[in-house]
Image: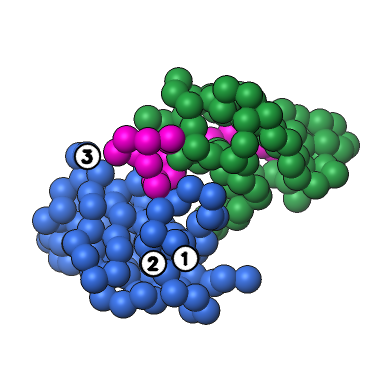
Chain colours: A green, B blue
Amino acid sequence: QQPVQSPQAVILREGEDAVINCSSSKALYSVHWYRQKHGEAPVFLMILLKGGEQKGHEKISASFNEKKQQSSLYLTASQLSYSGTYFCGTVHAGGTSYGKLTFGQGTILTVHP
Amino acid sequence: GAVVSQHPSWVICKSGTSVKIECRSLDFQATTMFWYRQFPKQSLMLMATSNEGSKATYEQGVEKDKFLINHASLTLSTLTVTSAHPEDSSFYICSATKVSTVTNEKLFFGSGTQLSVL
């Protein structure tokens, strides 16, 4: 089951903040966040495993809600280099999807000077 | 950090021909490799999961006879698009992990292969 990301696209000026959400209808084992620039491979940002967990750096962080069905990626004081498409990838807690990463549809982030 | 090399980066072929894409883990043993397909401005869609020495597991709707996957060693997996047609044109990207299932381990992605079928 593909997770749902929102918004589909975000346009920011340098220094502004953004939040990208990732939701699943079922409980997840883990959530992964990746960023992809056009024509390049996705680059790993972080993994969240525990309900209620928050992790990340000062300017890029993420949370995983207690029910483990939603994650949010926080980008603060955005830089031009943050531009790209952000994907969340989810691993379900069981069933045939266990052990496989299923990606959301992506959120296109554009940062302008 | 772990590096995954994918080759070729670009390939243009005639309709009806077969194309082979290689994915190598350069500095680690990849227990599991995944093959994804990505259309422009869309998500990465998992095609199949391959484990070294065993048959690949294909996702629903992916033709295993058309997309042949071989994982002959812990460092090499290949995807062969057989009898390619224009609708097979896409960005194909492999990824590898050091463990047998993706749970709390990150994926290492290759740089992708843009396939154009004329």
Q: Nearer the viewer, residue A17 or B49?
A: B49
The correct choice, above or below, for B82 with respect to B64 in the image is below
Q: Which numbered circle lies on residue B98?
A: 1
Secondary structure under badge 2?
Answer: loop
Counting from the top left corner in percent of width and height, residue B111 is at 49, 64
Q: Quadrant of the N terminus of chain B?
A: bottom right
**What is the three-letter code of the residue carrying label 2?**
Thr
- N-term mark: 2 or 1: 2
- The answer to whether the residues at label 2 and label 1 have Cβ atoms under 8 Å apart is yes
Output the chain of dot 1: B
Does residue A45 appear to the left or right of B96 in the view shown? right
Q: Quadrant of residue A12?
A: top right
Magenta-highlighted residues? A92-113
The residue sitting at 54% across, 50% down in the picture is: B104
- N-term mark: 1 or 3: 3
The residue sitting at 30% across, 63% down in the picture is: B51
Does residue A100 appear to the left or right of A15 in the view shown? left
Q: Which numbered circle lies on residue B31?
A: 2
Q: State the CA–CA distance, disc 2 to disc 1.
A: 5 Å
**What is the three-letter code of the residue carrying label 3?**
Gln
Output the chain of dot 2: B
**What is the three-letter code of the residue carrying label 1?**
Lys
Q: State the CA–CA distance, disc 3 to disc 2.
A: 22 Å
Residue that badge 3 annotates: B60
Counting from the top left corner in percent of width and height, residue A57 is at 80, 47
- N-term mark: 3 or 2: 2
Q: Nearer the viewer, mark 1 or mark 3?
A: 1
The residue sitting at 18% across, 66% down in the picture is: B18
Residue B63 belongs to magenta span: no
Secondary structure under badge 1?
Answer: loop
Q: State the CA–CA distance, disc 1 to disc 3.
A: 25 Å
The residue sitting at 46% across, 40% down in the picture is: A91
